[in-house]
């Protein structure tokens, strides 16, 4: 049992950072290979021919589903849809239209870059047009920073930090009148299946709890 616990929490660092021999062809710059921190985008682009499947569950019975595909290198296209009161009591209130996600990205050495558009309303207003850069600092730490524009120009930043072979912590911050801080913990219980618990607006006094289920692979 002791040996099993040790393997779960403290396998070597290199195993967590997906290497070039990985069957998905994922690069070591990305820890758990997801296109978002909590709500804001990362620079990750899924491999050509693969798919991204994501479900988000939040306050007031909110459910948002998203599917993305990578038809060619360095490009992802996705569509999302959801609503409130889908879980729990009350009549469901569905979004008036689907969300659309488009992302182009590239990598140079230990830096990665992406530009894109996301019209889905995850918690507050949609992200809109954005540009983001990420870097590999080593020690399983990848910071991100970017700008976005919907109705006004915004700035966001965040990071993902690996704490074991199967777990990582994500955080992000942005300004909306006041400074908003979101954070979450990810658990990879299959090679491409990740469960994430998020806490949004931590500094606001009553954080919003959310759950995210993600899959990146070949369907």
Image (tube, helix red, strand yellow):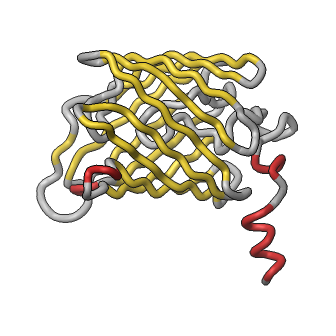
Would residue 132 be visible to someone looking at this image?
A: yes
- At a point 59% along the width and 34% down the height, the residue shown is 143
- At a point 56% along the width and 39% down the height, the residue shown is 159
Q: Which x, y percent locates residue 204?
A: 26, 50
Q: Is residue 66 above or below residue 5?
A: above
Name the foreground residue: 99 vs 171: 171
Q: Residue furthest left?
A: 90
Q: Which x, y percent locates residue 114?
A: 56, 19
Q: Could you say which quadrant of the image residue 46 lies in?
A: top right
- At a point 26% along the width and 16% down the height, the residue shown is 152
Would residue 218 be visible to someone looking at this image?
A: no
Q: Which x, y percent locates residue 124?
A: 26, 36
The quarter in which the C terminus is drawn is top right
Q: Residue furthest right?
A: 21
- Relative horizontal placement of residue 71, taking residue 149 as reference (left or right): right
Q: Residue furthest bottom?
A: 1
Q: Is residue 201 above or below residue 68?
A: below
- At a point 64% along the width and 39% down the height, the residue shown is 33
Name the foreground residue: 208 vs 100: 208
The quarter in which the N terminus is drawn is bottom right
Q: Which x, y percent locates residue 36?
A: 50, 37
């Amino acid at each position: 049992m002791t040996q099993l616990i040790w393997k779960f929490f403290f396998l070597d660092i290199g195993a967590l950072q997906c290497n070039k021999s990985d069957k998905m062809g994922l690069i070591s710059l990305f820890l758990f290979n997801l296109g978002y921190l909590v709500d804001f985008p990362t620079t990750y682009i899924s491999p050509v021919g693969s798919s991204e499947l994501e479900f988000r569950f939040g306050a007031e019975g909110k459910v948002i589903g998203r599917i993305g595909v990578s038809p060619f290198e360095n490009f992802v296209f996705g569509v999302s849809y959801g609503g409130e009161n889908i879980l729990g009591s009350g009549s469901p209130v569905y979004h008036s239209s689907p969300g659309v996600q488009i992302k182009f990205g590239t990598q140079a050495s230990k830096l990665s870059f992406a530009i894109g558009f996301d019209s889905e309303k995850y918690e507050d207003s949609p992200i809109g047009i954005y540009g983001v850069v990420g870097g590999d600092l080593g020690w399983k730490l990848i910071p991100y920073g970017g700008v976005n524009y919907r109705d006004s120009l915004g700035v966001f930043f965040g990071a993902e930090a690996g704490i074991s072979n199967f777990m990582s912590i994500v955080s992000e911050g942005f300004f909306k009148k006041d400074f908003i801080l979101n954070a979450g913990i990810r658990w990879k219980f299959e090679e491409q299946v990740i469960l994430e618990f998020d806490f949004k607006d931590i500094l606001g006094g009553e954080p919003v709890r959310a759950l995210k289920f993600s899959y990146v692979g070949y369907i």
